[in-house]
Amino acid sequence: MNSANSFGSRFVVTSFGESHGPAMGAVIDGMPAGILWDEQILFNEIQRRRPGTSAVVSSRNELDTPEVLSGVYQGKTLGTPIAILIRNQDARSNDYKQITSQPRPGHGDDVWFTKFGHSDPRGGGRSSGRETIARVVGGAVARMFLKEVCPQLKIIGFASQIGPFFLSSHALSTLSVTDLYQADRFVARYPSPAQEKDVENLLLEAKAHGLSYGGLAEIWIEGVPKNLGQPVFRKLKADFASAFMGVGAVTTFELGDGVQNVKEEGSQFHRREDDGSRYGGIRGGISTGERIRLRAGFKPTSSVLDVAKKGRHDPCIVPRAIPVLEAMAALVLVDHILWARGDRFV
Amino acid sequence: MNSANSFGSRFVVTSFGESHGPAMGAVIDGMPAGILWDEQILFNEIQRRRPGTSAVVSSRNELDTPEVLSGVYQGKTLGTPIAILIRNQDARSNDYKQITSQPRPGHGDDVWFTKFGHSDPRGGGRSSGRETIARVVGGAVARMFLKEVCPQLKIIGFASQIGPFFLSSHALSTLSVTDLYQADRFVARYPSPAQEKDVENLLLEAKAHGLSYGGLAEIWIEGVPKNLGQPVFRKLKADFASAFMGVGAVTTFELGDGVQNVKEEGSQFHRREDDGSRYGGIRGGISTGERIRLRAGFKPTSSVLDVAKKGRHDPCIVPRAIPVLEAMAALVLVDHILWARGDRFV
Amino acid sequence: MNSANSFGSRFVVTSFGESHGPAMGAVIDGMPAGILWDEQILFNEIQRRRPGTSAVVSSRNELDTPEVLSGVYQGKTLGTPIAILIRNQDARSNDYKQITSQPRPGHGDDVWFTKFGHSDPRGGGRSSGRETIARVVGGAVARMFLKEVCPQLKIIGFASQIGPFFLSSHALSTLSVTDLYQADRFVARYPSPAQEKDVENLLLEAKAHGLSYGGLAEIWIEGVPKNLGQPVFRKLKADFASAFMGVGAVTTFELGDGVQNVKEEGSQFHRREDDGSRYGGIRGGISTGERIRLRAGFKPTSSVLDVAKKGRHDPCIVPRAIPVLEAMAALVLVDHILWARGDRFV
Amino acid sequence: MNSANSFGSRFVVTSFGESHGPAMGAVIDGMPAGILWDEQILFNEIQRRRPGTSAVVSSRNELDTPEVLSGVYQGKTLGTPIAILIRNQDARSNDYKQITSQPRPGHGDDVWFTKFGHSDPRGGGRSSGRETIARVVGGAVARMFLKEVCPQLKIIGFASQIGPFFLSSHALSTLSVTDLYQADRFVARYPSPAQEKDVENLLLEAKAHGLSYGGLAEIWIEGVPKNLGQPVFRKLKADFASAFMGVGAVTTFELGDGVQNVKEEGSQFHRREDDGSRYGGIRGGISTGERIRLRAGFKPTSSVLDVAKKGRHDPCIVPRAIPVLEAMAALVLVDHILWARGDRFV
């Protein structure tokens, strides 16, 4: 796409809205007609992204009720653009007054002003994390498609590191699959019964003292159709990388074993007697049908105590970013499922 | 772009050619008129990418003479598409006969066949590393633009890890700037006088025994104009990630301190008394004018001894990938320089 | 654009909404930051398109109040997407019940159903003329840009034929410029004091008896910057043609003298001692700075008496289509003004 | 597409080459894998476009041998970009020396120079009709797809007006179908046994005296699949209009009865007891499966005697433009056949 606020080639999401303006929203174009409209998915995903749901995240309280303006009729998609609107209800822009004169370190506030000459300082305007609600909305619509067309497909997101705490390979392999797949039930979506309490304490204390932490988010995808991804510039891994690195505080992207790959001699690496997951489910840029494993690294949240102390921010953004990364993954998948239809014809 | 073989939104490179077909090539569209055509840049970059230039890389010998077919007249660009052709001269496709029946582990051979039903097995066809010559050609044209419009801009690529050898932060900081900026003069583009001999031995032995290694490549960019990058989906970091992850064996992408960021508490991270380079020169998705620091991780080369022993491959792809990553970086930069012209108007 | 509901390459309008769904709307992306937000232009253009303003057009009564949801702050554009919403207020979908079983002749009702398998029969859903409000909204935003960047530019639309009545070349040349430029003041936007009454009678009678007529609309553009249009596939005339032929009942497109050109011998045609307007202000696909003259032909309105007699339709769509064509012209102009910035650089 | 030299959204042709530069060419991306490569189609279409084949067209003699550089293997397409090269062999650029100082009337020579500041004056560079060979090449590849996927589809092009001579509706209806469908056998592709001699004389005389004529070309398409075309901005008629108006001297575009439509009262128009062809095979922007009828009007050829007398030009461009328009039509059709795959999914 040649538009800065649209994502995708066949399944295109256009995001709009400033953090403290009247509304956020998304227009989804390219959704085939006749797909069952499952509004519950939309509500769920918005709810999963919502701040204010636990003590360890921002206390900003947003009802975030989506209004579907077009593209759906009698419970099915029409093949026309689906526009979804979310009003900004809890927008105390006074909290951000200071920003104009004193930009928050690590934030893009000053950068945007320099770029555009005129920018909306209220809550970061469009560089705010609030913008990600448009992605979650788009991803929810993508999930409706996936539910119907690839019912076996499953997108699993969890935190594998929160500040100093991380899941070792060993820890990962000994966690129950249920824990892993239901990360939402854990504090900070970090599925470790053993470390859960430590992580909670870390984040509560961080919140109290204006500290912040980075971390790692894992997105696993199971039941992916083979043959997704286009060779050369639109490899599946390239599109996932673009999708994840387009999210606010993300500074690293890894496929499969990622940085572990680097260290290993090739004949060992390629012959290993295991599930082949070191390739992360993508070879030659194309999905193999095996589990796709993606990882995103986040720098510590930028908003710390003194500058925006009343700003309702998260001590670690990873837990709330997970539904956003899942949404981006869903968008990439649907885009490539539609695209792959043109690979062969006869 | 909605085409799998084109890259860019304003400055668009279309790549074509199979590894053992008649020719490789690129069409570059969006180059403004009147830019000085500096063919030496084109020759240099192709030469830098060329295999067969040292004992530690593939001995495939390609003359790779570019032929400029259009878009240039009397030493200047015309504002029309620039088509550049490189004949495949040294294409011993017999070496690859075995591939059809026995796909190379880690390669995309089987994946492509599954996807398309019909694919070119000769040397990997279009999934071959040979395809990257089109990117280097496109990048060379981008460099001509940069030379004229941003003469102060400098793209610096080097290896910071080759298999088990890596440059520590300390090593990096104590290397002379000259060494760093002239990495081409070192074996494997690994700018360490201290470890150079070790790296050479590692790779010679690997070549002899069919071993292979991964590694890390760094791309630094100095003198970048401020304000490049578009908010939301086309952040500068997202486009770099897509550009690098679209290259063959790349499995990780990092911005600035990258995986180091994850571990640090935010108030320390954001206040550090240093050059601000931990952000990697991009904040809010937009260039700040500071040095941009990008890092790509490579898995070990796939072609090992027994399957394609006569294949003329590299024990570690990192050195040869560096000119390719630099080219991709140049493409991203020119695309965004052209794009940024629309940010403001009056 | 590779999305069916988006128009433009640099200045991109995405249209959404079904005729009798909750709302219509547009998202405009690519508007530079800092442009003065002149809401009066938006109101005017919506008002100009509105049905129910005279006896000769549909009596559907829509207030069509636009709500600006994003992209504007303190009276200036932000460089972010501008989303504008218009609620559907007067949607008596019962009038259209019959359509499902008996498609309206000449309409796309049945065609859409065949294509998508599931479509919205209420008032034609998205194939309704109601959709054009999104274009008028987008065009109004484009006009704000033009007002600031090309204050001398003027888009002049009028009807040159309504059913059997047409302005001859002679009539055109003898009408006062004021009449021509203020066509809105005439019945059916047909600027002929002599024929005005006849046209009114024709349309009133047509309305009473369920008859309908086609016609011709002219769009003239004065004060166009030179050098707009991209060679080969994106010639300015090609983009205008796509823009106009993308409007509902349009079946012909002409540039300059259009069908008159065909009949003339070349040496006469090219040497004529006149204002050069036979070329229509575009040569080699590029604007010359002279007046651009475009013409669109409309087939008779499809909705005639017996099938949808209660449908509130227009006996001739040309008058109401004029603001839509003007809007499309404005979109093309801004797209190419932004694009032309990349033609040269140094 | 956001690139000036690429056409299509799913099936993308990129054109390159200056008239008197080393070569012309096209890269076709989006062709599915496994389509039979029928090189005879490619030769035929290039031959059909070729000047020098009769006394009434330009005597420029071009062998125009295509070289297929990529995308084809063992007689089938690979799903990768197909690059095709045609060397410029008969490029007597001295004939055009005068152009720099004295631009040809009606040509874009001066316009391009003004736009780009630097342009190739040799034979019009890229604004030359020579560029259309890239479109014919792209169209030939599209025809291979159509032959396999829609074997019943037939693209029929002929001239219906050459200067003062035109086929009346009556003449059209009384011509034998064979004549109509084999227009290539007639002088100037004008399928009128009665007027053939007159047309020939007209053109021979025009050639001798440096006169030129415009005319009309008809493109009919039979056996079109239903449901092609995307609503709103990418209606099938809009894409055909863009495709045709993107060709050099075209100044008008008509669908179905075109300018005839304008004059008729709607209840008569829509109820007529005939084959429905007045709609031109497209309703609501979407193909109905009926014959598609398109018409393009050309202004008189610009190159007349005194300025470029030695230039080898055509007294009427219509005959040679017909294969070009057919090629553009084929591109639009394949693009929309591929696109329509996403309309429904389940």
Image (spheres, coloured by chain):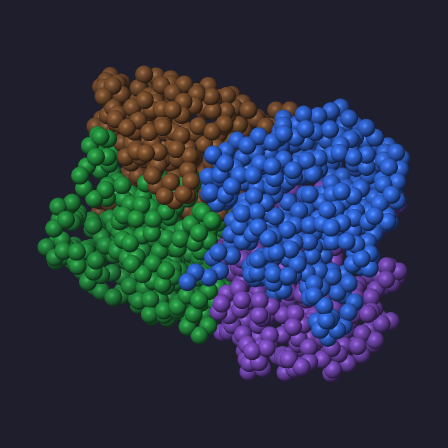
Chain colours: A green, B brown, C purple, D blue
Q: Is residue D6 above or below residue D160?
A: above
| Residue A186 in picture, x, y percent from top left | 18, 60
Q: Nearer the viewer, residue D326 or A21?
A: D326
In screen coordinates, is A200 left or right of C160?
A: left
Q: Is residue B99 above or below residue B230?
A: above
Q: Nearer the viewer, residue B284 or B26?
A: B26
Q: Is residue D119 above or below residue A290?
A: above
Q: Is residue A156 above or below residue B212?
A: below
In screen coordinates, is C274 left or right of A274?
A: right
Taking the spot 88% from the left edge, 60% from the top edge, the residue there is C170
* Quadrant (top left, top right, bottom left, bottom right) of the C terminus of chain D: bottom left
Is there any visible trace of residue D86 in the rendered image? yes
Is there any visible trace of residue A238 in the rendered image? no
Tell me how many marks there are. 0
Q: Residue furthest left?
A: A194
Query: Based on the displayed image, in which of its 4 quarters is residue C153 positioned?
Result: bottom right
Taking the spot 61% from the left edge, 24% from the top edge, the residue there is B75
Taking the spot 46% from the left edge, 39% from the top edge, the residue there is D78
| Residue D263 in picture, x, y percent from top left | 79, 67
| Residue C13 in picture, x, y percent from top left | 55, 58
Taking the spot 69% from the left edge, 50% from the top edge, the residue there is D156
| Residue C259 in picture, x, y percent from top left | 79, 54
In screen coordinates, is C56 left or right of D337?
A: right
